[in-house]
Structures are given as C-alpha cells and as structure tokens.
Image (tube, grey):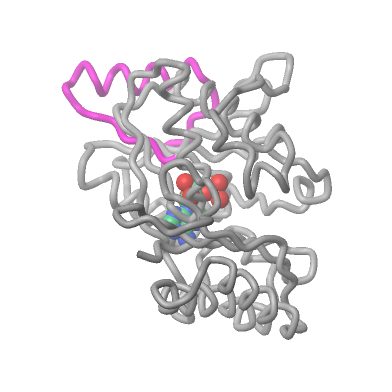
Amino acid sequence: MNIIKTKTEIAKYVSEKREQKYSIGFVPTMGALHLGHASLIAFGLKRHHYIVVSIFVNPTQFNNAIDLEKYPRTLEQDTSFLSKYGDKVVIYAPTPQEVYGNQVMSKQYNFKGIETVMEGTHRPGHFDGVGTVLNHLFRQVNPDEAFFGEKDYQQLLIVKKLVEIEKLPLKITGCPIHRQENGLAMSSRNARLTAQQLEEAAFIYKILQQVKKDFDSKSAQALREWVAIQFENNPHLELEYFEISNIKNLRPLSRKRTHQKYRAFIAAFAGDIRLIDNMAIN
Ligand code: AMP
C-alpha cells in the first residue's frame, strides 16, 4: 500500500497519473476508516482511475481539546482496511506542518450564512478550520473531483462554497449516508461507543424517520416539540439540537413552501461522545 507523507510526493504522484491521461478522485478523511468512508471510495472509483484518500486529523477544526485528543488515530489499521484496493487507492497522510507550514491556524471565511447555524453555532471556528484544511489539501492533491458524505451535510455545502470562494478547479460531489443495520450512521466516533450505546444510538435514526413520516401532517414547531420530548424521555442520549432546514441555504423552516426541499438534522451526546445525523424529509 502506497503511503505518501509529503506534498511534494503527492503532487508528483498526481501529475504523473494525469500525464498518463488518468483522472483522480479525492476522499478527504480523518482516518479511523469505516464502511462509510469505503462507500465514498467506491463511488469515486466508478468515475476515476485512482483515488487519493487523505488521512489527517485536522487540529484547527476541533473546538474542544479533549475531543481532538480522544479522536481515534489508527493509521496501521486504516492501511490494511484500504489494502484491498491495491494501487487504485493511495493514502496521503501528512503531518500538520506539511499541510499548514509553520503556522497551524485557520483562515477566516464568509460562507454566506451556511456557517452560522447548527454545527457552526455549537462548534465555534469549526468551519473555518474545515475550509482552511481543505483549501490546503485541494491545492496539494489537485484532484479532478472530491467526494463528501451527506452524513456531514452542512460541511458538504460549506465545501461547495469554499471551492467557489477559492476558485478551485475541482468538482464536489455528495454521497449518501452509510448506516449500520440498526440505522445508526457510521462514524469514526462510533468506535468509542460501547455495544449497548451502539444499540441505543439508533434512536437518532428512528426519530429522523418518524419526523420524515409526520412532515406532511405536522408543523415544524410541533415536530421540534415532539423531538425535544422524545429526547427528554430518553436516559441514554442528550439532544444538542434538532432542526429542519432548507437543503440549499440551511435556513430553519418556519413556514413550509411547496417545491422547497428540507432536511432534518440532529446532534446528540451519548455520554461524552457527540453524534450527528440528518435525513431528507420531503
Ligand atoms: P471524517 O473522517 O469523519 O472526517 O469523514 C470523512 C468523509 O467521510 C466526510 O466526507 C464524511 O461526510 C464522510 N462520511 C463519514 N461517515 C459517513 C457515512 N456514514 N456515510 C457516508 N459518508 C460518511
């Protein structure tokens, strides 16, 4: 398995492939790879000859030092997870200095309001960190197309805006959420859940499904109140936010409009582990 650690080498790898008329897809990750990541790689391999998977736990997108410290780092396991792809997949696993140079810090972006709701409210600075690292990684890897999960739907919209702002020559494509059998969205953070918590956390998916079912018959406010009560009655999960938002600008729904599409979003804690999920509801 080819692990590239420097920006010089990744640039050389990609330009050689391109000279040979091959196209390059890119799947940025923070490692602790799971089947959700694999679904992005599979999506990418349908369209491109080679996929670069970056594995980089980005310090500037963590607003909580303990979360950063506890984030799983499993490069050896990740390498064997990717070995089945042979030379179709290459790992880019740089150090913070390699990505950022000497100043590991965020640039400040204006993402036109997408950054001020939900994850933006609850994780101050998070999207500046995401935007900054991806701006660096996109320039270092220089792919034709990059793939992002709808699991982090707000992030997907931020990345599309970033590419516009930075005028980067690549396409951004969103891919469906990959779930466990019980409905829980796969996530690297799930590795920290106990077997019991893994079962209990499927509650988040069940709530989203019910919201989707009731969307036509109930108002947004009634749905918000219903969700709040469900979580109050659940001793295992603590709701951080629930929102129903327009899929394009993420403005919270007040009055339903025909022809507008909405998604429901949840962030909740199982102990000290923060989980997010969302679902298209109409
Ligand atoms: P992460 O390593 O958590 O930063 O995620 C890297 C990429 O994988 C992001 O684009 C995520 O949205 C995506 N991803 C993570 N979990 C899933 C999932 N369960 N289904 C689909 N994509 C996912």
- Quadrant hosting residue 234: bottom right
Q: Looking at the picture, tell me which residue is in the foreground, 227 or 61.
A: 227
Does any portion of residue 80 appear in the rendered image?
A: no
Q: Which residues are magenta?
A: 1-27
Q: Position of residue 162 (x, y in %)?
A: 48, 26
Name of the residue lying farthest toward the left: 21
- Magenta highlight on residue 25: yes
Please determine whether, in this image, residue 25 is positioned above or below residue 204. Answer: above
Q: Is 22 one of the magenta-colored residues?
A: yes
- For the C terminus, which image quadrant? bottom left
Is residue 64 rendered to the left or right of residue 230? right
Residue 123 place in picture, x, y as percent: 72, 44
Which image quadrant: the N terminus? top left
Q: Residue at x 23, y 29 (%)?
A: 23
Of 110 and 244, the residue lying toward us: 244
Residue at x-position 40% and y-position 51%:
83
Quick check: can you spot residue 165? yes
Q: Picture coordinates of residue 18 (x, y %)?
A: 24, 20
Q: Position of residue 65 (x, y in %)?
A: 82, 44
Of the pair 268 and 11, the residue shown nearer to us? 268
Residue lying at 62% horizontally and 52% vertically, measured from the top left: 74
| Res 45 → quadrant | top left
Position of 229 compared to 207: left or right? Answer: right
Residue lying at 42% horizontally and 24% vertically, measured from the top left? 163
Instruction: Please state the total of marks drawn on the protein image.
Output: 0
Where on the picture, by quarter, is residue 235?
bottom right
Q: Is residue 273 left or right of residue 139?
A: right
Q: Is residue 96 above or below residue 224?
A: above
